Amino acid sequence: MEDKTKIRLTAAEMAVLWTQYINDKITVCVVGHFLKKVEDEEVRPSIEITLKAANRNIANLNELFKQENSPVPRGFTKEDVNEDAPRLFSDTFVLMYLRYMSILGMAAASVAIGVATRDDVIVFFKSVLKEAVVLQDLTTKLMLKQGTYVKPPYIANPDKVDYVEKQSFLAGFIGDIRPLTAQEIMMLFNNIQTNAVGKALIIAFAQTSKNKEVTQYFLRGKQIAQKHIDIFSDILKKEDLPAPMTWDNSISNSTSPVFSDKLMMFHISAMIAAGIGNYGASMSASPRRDLGVKYASLIPEIALYAEDGANIMIKNGWLEEPPQAVDRNHIIKKE
């Protein structure tokens, strides 16, 4: 029987494996800091499980890259973390952060399984998906127990099954504007939460960065995140629906550097990419025209912010190149 592991990796497989490796390297740095500073013993198991899974993934990926004679990405190392730095995040925020990361992990692993064809790659990402589900379950249950889990709003059960009869169902600017659908509420609520987590991280990063340009970049991101939180919250409030809380008060007053500017910039860039994807998904699930237009108007703003962040990383030599196609024109010209 043909050894399936001898089949070359596709571009899609290279992409998801490279991204997973970089993300796991960030996880080891960030969650390793959490583990050293955790005080709540109920939160500790979630941190330990996350760190153990990330280290196991890194070991498996190192072996896979070697088998493929492919260079192992550098990612992030102990040099990107100051282990002696004071505590920066509360345990409550750490739990919320881990839950959010588990959701991103489930989404990324699902995509990877869908685009992979090699058996060993599929098996690897099935393991990643399983670990993310376990973490999501663990953190959700603990947040519910501790009273820190903020549930999406409740709405009344429908009286009957009905069908859309008028174009006004799509209206959102003038005329008879219908109430939000359950899907639209879900998307608005989730986008507020993700912006709230991102804003708290950006605040922590801004107050601990020693690079003036990076600090200013984070302050700009803080303003953008708050603007988006306000926009989505106002839409919910107009429907007499509650908006989730922010996490700004979960950050300590420490200004001692914990993570390198390189790591912080990459982490925020990854979250921006996830945010753009969330807005795109929200547009597709929001038939009301005013919501679609709102999401469409916000995407360019964060896309430009992401581009400016990439330029800062390129300028400082922090942006590691992912696998790329061969430049045939360059080879032909032999330049």
Image: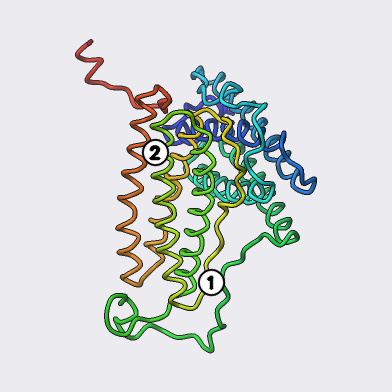
Residue 40, percent from left and from top: 77, 46
Please determine whether, in this image, residue 219 is positioned above or below residue 210.
below
Please name whichever residue, 228 or 331, is drawn nearer the observer in this view of the structure: 228
Do tag 1 and tag 2 residues touch (Cβ < 8 Å)?
no
**Is 295 positioned to the left or the right of 119 in the image?**
left
109 or 226, which lies in front?
226
Q: Secondary structure at mark 2?
A: helix
Q: The residue under label 1 is which amino acid type?
A: Pro
Report which quarter residue 105 is drawn in. Answer: top right
Question: Going by the picture, which residue comes out furthest to the right?
Answer: 41
Question: Badge 1 local density, few (<14 within 10 Å), some, or many (20+)?
Answer: some
Badge 2, how many Cα within 10 Å: few under 14, some, many 20+?
some
Residue assigned mark 2: 217
In the rendered structure, which amino acid carries the disc numbered 2? Tyr
The image quadrant where one finds the N terminus is top right
Q: Is residue 224 above or below residue 155?
A: above
Q: Position of residue 137 (x, y in %)?
A: 69, 54
Residue 86, image x, y percentages: 66, 33
Report the number of numbered marks: 2
The kind of secondary structure element at disc 1 is: loop
Question: Mark number for residue 242?
Answer: 1
Please tell me whether residue 303 is drawn above or below residue 154 in the rendered image. above
Quote the CA–CA distance across marks 1 and 2.
31 Å
Q: Residue at x 51, y 17 (%)?
A: 69
- The answer to whether 163 appears left or right of 134 in the picture is left
Give the x, y percent position of residue 42: 78, 49
- What label sits on residue 171 in the rendered view? none
